[in-house]
Amino acid sequence: MNKLYRSRTDSKLTGLCGGLAAYFGIDSTIVRLAMVIGGVFSLGTVLMIYIIAAIVIPKEPGIEGFYKDNPYHY
């Protein structure tokens, strides 16, 4: 099962579009373009959803979690 995360590597602002693209298996440029077009035609509703999703959806796990939880790291 795939989990939805904000991307650390494919990030322009918050990594949300990169994470959505990885989750659905499509190109992140298409997701970013859809966000911009949706933001223009929805009069800002998509922008509010984007901000809420960027706060709620966690960043994908990275290497710092390994070092923080590893008791043998000096």
Image (tube, rainbow, N blue to C red):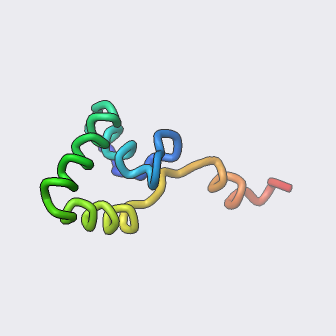
Q: Position of residue 59 (x, y in %)?
A: 47, 56
Query: For the point 19% across and 54% down, which residue is it?
Result: 40
Query: For the point 32% across and 39% down, which residue is it?
Result: 21
Query: For the point 42% across and 52% down, which residue is it?
Result: 6
Query: For the point 71% across and 54% down, which residue is it?
Result: 67
**Would you identify the image quadrant in which residue 73 lies?**
bottom right
Q: Decide: is 41 above or below 29.
A: below
Q: Nearer the viewer, residue 59 or 15?
A: 15
Q: Decide: is 43 above or below 7.
A: below
Q: Is residue 23 left or right of residue 7?
A: left
Q: Decide: is 40 above or below 56.
A: above
**Would you identify the image quadrant in which residue 22 lies?**
top left
Q: Is residue 7 left or right of residue 41?
A: right
Q: State the count of labels.
A: 0
Q: Position of residue 74 (x, y in %)?
A: 86, 56
Q: Position of residue 34 (x, y in %)?
A: 22, 43
Of all residues, the one furthest to the right in this rendering is 74
